[in-house]
Image (spheres, grey):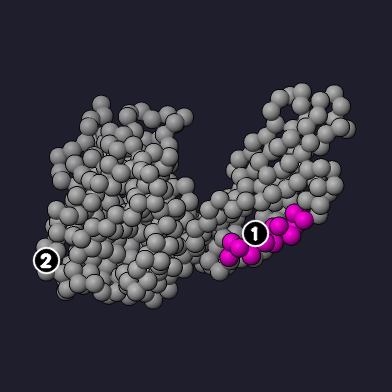
Amino acid sequence: MPEAAGGSPVVDTLARLVAWDTVSHRPLTALAGYLADRAEAAGMRVERFETAPGKVNIVASAGPPSPDGLLLSGHMDVVPVEGQAWTSDPFVLTRRDDRLVARGACDMKGFIAAAVEACGAVDLRHLRRELVLVWTHDEEIGCHGSRALVDRLRAEQPERQLPRATIIGEPTDFRICRLHPGHTTFTIECLGRPAHSSRPSLGFNAIRLAAEVIALVDSFAVALEDRRAHSDLLLTPYTVLNVGRIEGGSAVNIVPERCTLTVGMRPVPGALAGPLLAELEDRLAPLRARARAEGGDLQLKLLQSSEPLDTPAGCAHADLLRPHADAPALVGVPFATDGGNLAQLGLEPLVFGPGSIDVAHRPDEHLREADLHRATAALTRIIEARCCA
């Protein structure tokens, strides 16, 4: 029988963290407040950067400010559980054999719990270089928190230099990852003219227009497959396009007036979202002109864009991670992280953490208990080596 997990400080901390339902559309101020309190109790200076009601980024620091210190970062939000076949309460940490099961256990509250306990294990009064913790909101829906934090720091603290050596604690099975695509989301709204479905010639069908748009997006996606980069690091070494949602029509007896497509794009490092969207607009132009001649239209709207990551392979802090990694080589991952945005501050993020992305976002998401303890010990040693030596 599954049992509620506990019994060690880091497991108890993880149990506290997962108990807060921080699915991205919900407030996360209670969890953020807890992490701020833990940082202050450890002797850290805490800054709260609120971006919207219920949404806040936490930046905690200790030691003399120094770009040669260490920055640890993770996101506090999680993905939804609705419609998934969980076999236990997703917001109660449950032990099953050697696994700790809960939403966020591996993605990525396990890393946050390990970092909190690691900070508690180090005497922060004797740091020689700065240690910074950055806990963000709304990473799962487009890295909104880190984007807002970068913009805020640039505007309000332009002279501030955060530590270049940055660890983003996503679940990588203790592999060191230096590169990943970005993630851009946009909509294409297809507008038509409504009419009685018995007289279709009096209207202009927005869903049929959307079907042509999908075909055009698909042809662009195929063309992008020829623009390959980083084939040695990425399983999909080209920019990916995905029509992820379609919403349209109001009734079966009405020629639809509106249909909206939501599209995701993952630009590989070196490919910029802006020029790619401009190229797509050019491809849409003839279809838009024909739609307007029929009284319709096409409108592309950018919803969010997070940056790709391409940290230099020779970054110095890779050697800090290698003793704790399952392999010495630096690799790429296919998913986006806050690292792409944080790199815009001159940081050099590496993605490294416990757990597997293969179980993230799925029912019965889990983290091996041994890996949670391993991450805590590794982060303790890394903090000591970078900030205390």
Q: Amino acid at mark 1?
A: Leu
Q: What residue lies at 67% left-to-right and 61% top-to-bottom?
A: 278
The front one of 121 and 66 is: 66
Residue 274 located within the stretch drawn in magenta:
yes
Work out whether residue 72 can be spotted.
yes
Between the C-alphas of marks 2 and 1, the distance is 49 Å
Look at the image and tell me in which quarter the N terminus lies. Answer: top left
The residue most toward the front is: 156
Q: Is residue 64 above or below residue 109?
A: below
Q: Is residue 2 above or below residue 178?
A: above
The percent position of residue 351, horizontal first and vertical second, equals 38, 60
- Across and down, in percent, residue 200 comes to 85, 30
Q: In which image quadrant can residue 43 be found?
A: bottom left
- Give the prevailing secondary structure in the magenta stretch: helix
Q: Which residue is depicted at the point 81% across and 25% down?
A: 196
Disc 1 is placed on an element classified as helix
Decide if residue 281 is on the left or right side of residue 103: right
Quarter in which the C terminus is drawn? bottom left
Q: Residues within 10 Å of mark 2 (few under 14, many from 20)?
A: few
- The foreground one among 113 and 325 is 113
- Identify the residue at image location x=69%, y=28%: 250
Q: Quadrant of residue 329?
A: bottom left
Q: Could you tell me residue 162's position as x and y percent?
A: 31, 69
Q: Amino acid at mark 2?
A: Arg
Note whether 97 is above or below 113 in the view shown.
above
From the top left corner, tell me how far across and down residue 60 is, in percent: 25, 59
Direction from residue 11 to residue 29 in the image, left or right = right
Q: Which residues are magenta?
A: 272-285
Residue at x 41%, y 66% (from the top left corner): 155
Residue that numbered label 1 is attached to:
277
**Which secondary structure lies at badge 2?**
helix
Q: Residue 125, labelled with which disc? A: 2
